[in-house]
Image (spheres, helix red, strand yellow):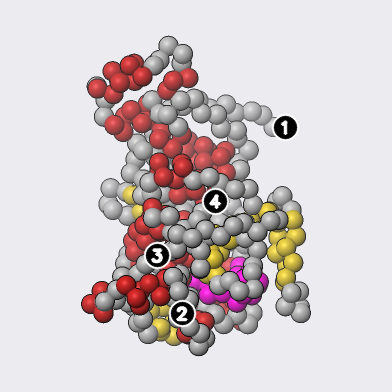
Amino acid sequence: MGGRVIGLSTANGSGNFFHQLWVGSQTGTNQFKGIFFPWDADGERNEDWYTAKARNMQSWQMHQEYPRFPEEAFIKSGNPVFDIDMLNLIETIEPDQGYFHLFADGNGEFRHAPEGNLSVWLYPELDSVYTIGADVAEGLSHGDYSSAHIIDASTGQVAAHWHGHIEPDLFGELLAELGWWYNNCLIGIESNNHGLTTLKAAQKHGYKNLYKQRRLTSVRADATDVLGWRTTTTSKPLAIDELSAILRDDGLQLVCMKTIAELKTYVRKENGRTTGSPHDDRTISLAIAVQMLKYVWLPEYRGDVSVPKNSLLWWEQHLFSPTNENKVFMGSHNVRKRVPF
């Protein structure tokens, strides 16, 4: 026989049990309904009252005790990596929700279902180029989630997002099928831990356009024979910083409410390391997909084709001198119109 639980509290930073309950209530990963009361919900409080309080309290204390919105309560009392005010300005769009199935003849079908793990904003277009970034979890039903973001490489628009619990080998097969659906696109799969299983499964499934590790200081560095994106103390800060930059500069068109909600909870700890509170799978898969934008036009991933004007590699070739060849222009400011569903 079920019961009811009602919890009432001010925020106390991010990453704790209460914060996890709140995030779950907003993303639909638990059965709680979150209700937020800002500081001015009390009719007797006004701006003069707030200003007087602020004179005697530190900024983080005001954000925690008298917040204007939930992210300010939980995150601004901590140390958010991404610009919360900027994320709050993003207008989210409801996706088509469902499942993807690839037939034996190579044709794919998207099946609408509210409980589906795949969210689609832009369906594949024949002349478009895409990248996929994937973060691999263990696959346990009560554990972390696996996540994959698909980005249109010409516009920087997030086309689709897969998120759910799945065994690592099956995730590899799924990624291969999504890659074929999105025009045999470049896939960057995190190779840490269970990621190797996912990589091998995608390869065994017949998928060839997989990212191979290379020296990160230059886009043109030769690829190794090692498959996958390796998250290290060097590559992770790079990927997160460049994700922050492309969001700040409007080079990435992100409309996924759940991904934005997770980005708001991504914080920098006192030791300098970054982490999600409680999850970071969406953040990591998006960051890897953005990293793939650097490489997607290279001949080894696209064949012998000319580099499109205004692509990431085109800007690198035309704007940066040889002494600055490591700099990369992240994203385009052109926004494609949404495909009518």
Query: Label 3 vs label 2: CA separation?
Result: 15 Å
Q: What type is the residue that disc 1 sits on?
A: Met
> Toward the viewer: 26 or 199?
26
Q: Is residue 48 placed above or below 77 in the rendered structure?
A: above
Q: Which residue is mark 4?
A: 255
The secondary structure type at the circle numbered 2 is: loop
Question: Would you say residue 127 sits in the magenta stretch?
Answer: no
The secondary structure type at the circle numbered 1 is: loop
Quadrant containing the C terminus in the rendered view: bottom right
- Count all numbered tags in the image, as a single digit: 4
Determine which of the numbered discs, if any, sits on residue 330 in the image: 3
Q: Which residue is mark 1?
A: 1
Quadrant containing the N terminus in the rendered view: top right
Q: Nearer the viewer, mark 2 or mark 1?
A: 2
Of marks 1 and 3, which one's residue comes earlier in the chain?
Answer: 1
**In the image, what residue occupies the spot 39% across and 16% down?**
46
> Toward the viewer: 134 or 121?
121
Query: Label 4 vs label 3: CA separation?
Result: 18 Å
The secondary structure type at the circle numbered 3 is: loop
**In the image, what residue occupies the spot 32% across and 72% down?**
319
The secondary structure type at the circle numbered 4 is: loop
Q: What type is the residue that disc 4 sits on?
A: Val
Q: Are marks 2 and 1 in contact (CB under 8 Å)?
A: no
Determine which of the numbered discs, if any, sits on residue 198 in the image: none
Q: Is residue 121 placed above or below 128 in the rendered structure?
A: above
Q: Which residue is mark 2?
A: 307
- Residue 151 in view in this figure: yes
Magenta residues span: 171-188
